[in-house]
Amino acid sequence: MKNNYNKRKERAGSGGKRVGKSLESKTSEFGKKKDSSSKKSEGTFKSSEPKYKRSFSKSTSAKSGNIPKKKSATDEMRLNRYIANAGVCSRREADTYITAGMVTVNGKPVTELGVKVKPTDEVRFDGRRLNPEKKIYLLLNKPKNFVTTTDDPHADKIVMDLVKNACSERIYPVGRLDRNTTGVLLFTNDGDLSKRLTHPSHNMRKVYQVSLDKPAERNHLEDIANGIVLEDGPISSDDISYVNDEEKTEVGIEIHSGKNRIVRRIFEHFGYRVKKLDRVYFAGLTKKNLQRGKWRFLSEKEILFLKKN
């Protein structure tokens, strides 16, 4: 048994290393800087930035994405922009689809570039009617004591309070985090993407840092990696290990399951109490350089990554 208890096999063409190794970066994904002078400890969770994350940066378009552009007197817009706003693809890719005859306007095929349409026009791509509303993708570093919901009359604080001034479009959280769980939470009005990210069949990667009330026993981590049975069925982690060998109350766990309170229930099964639970990674997104309670728009590269994966 390897000390980081990683049971997942390497994927062909993925560049390589198992999760325990790939979770390694200059700045820890768990918020602790790596000491390059110290030796790598066995059994230590190597928090990381995956290779593809290097290209994720806050672009100028992300900073200015909430500045409305001027519209024509009739609210017309170019067809490629209409398609891009519907979340299908980029404007450049839309031009390719238009010339290929895959787009119709009010029932008629359009293959000429530069055509303008109105919000009231019926635009279809590959037979599917499009919604012209601009797609919004926003990342929040959720603080504690906020309920993940769009509306709850019984809750004092909900996550929507933190993003209510972000945009004029109606956005909603993708998945949920418990009231006392902090970390990465995505918001969007892209229904197709939201369904894909939350559907169990897509196995979106999630990484959590768990703070326990007492040191975690090594054999318990092995059991979690190999699989245990809870009241609602079997469950196992994809990767689990100590954040560092000095404080064995801090554990990093990677899991794909979206079951309710699954991380807390895993550790409660062995008699631990979870004091803090922080999601540090979700579907390729991290909260790096984002303060607790703050939000930002995703960059174009992050959006493309989510849609392609």
Image: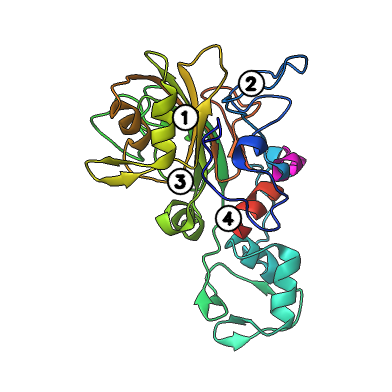
Give residue 118's mark. Answer: none
Q: Earlier in the sequence, mark 2 or mark 4?
A: 2
Residue 96 sits above or below residue 165 on the image: below
Does 230 sit left or right of 124 as displayed?
left
Q: Give the range drawn in magenta.
A: 52-60
Q: Which of marks 1 and 3 is nearer the N terminus?
A: 1
For mark 1, what is the residue? 162
Q: Residue 214, how many percent across, how many down?
A: 38, 13
Is residue 59 within the magenta segment?
Answer: yes
The foreground one among 5 and 197 is 5
Say whether marks 3 and 2 touch (CB < 8 Å): no
Residue pictured at 51% horizontal, 12% vertical: 247
Residue pictured at 41% horizontal, 27% vertical: 219
Per the model, the C-alpha gap separating discs 2 and 4 is 48 Å
Give residue 256's mark. Answer: 3
The foreground one among 170 and 102 is 102
For mark 2, what is the residue? 41
Q: Residue 248, how many percent across, how many down?
A: 48, 16
Say whether marks 4 and 3 touch (CB < 8 Å): no
Per the model, the C-alpha gap separating discs 4 and 3 is 30 Å
Per the model, the C-alpha gap separating discs 3 and 2 is 26 Å
Per the model, the C-alpha gap separating discs 1 and 2 is 39 Å
Residue 74, quarter of picture: bottom right
Per the image, label 4 sits on a secondary structure element best described as: loop
Q: Earlier in the sequence, mark 4 or mark 1?
A: 4
Per the image, label 3 sits on a secondary structure element best described as: loop
For mark 4, what is the residue? 134
Does 252 sit left or right of 180 as displayed?
right
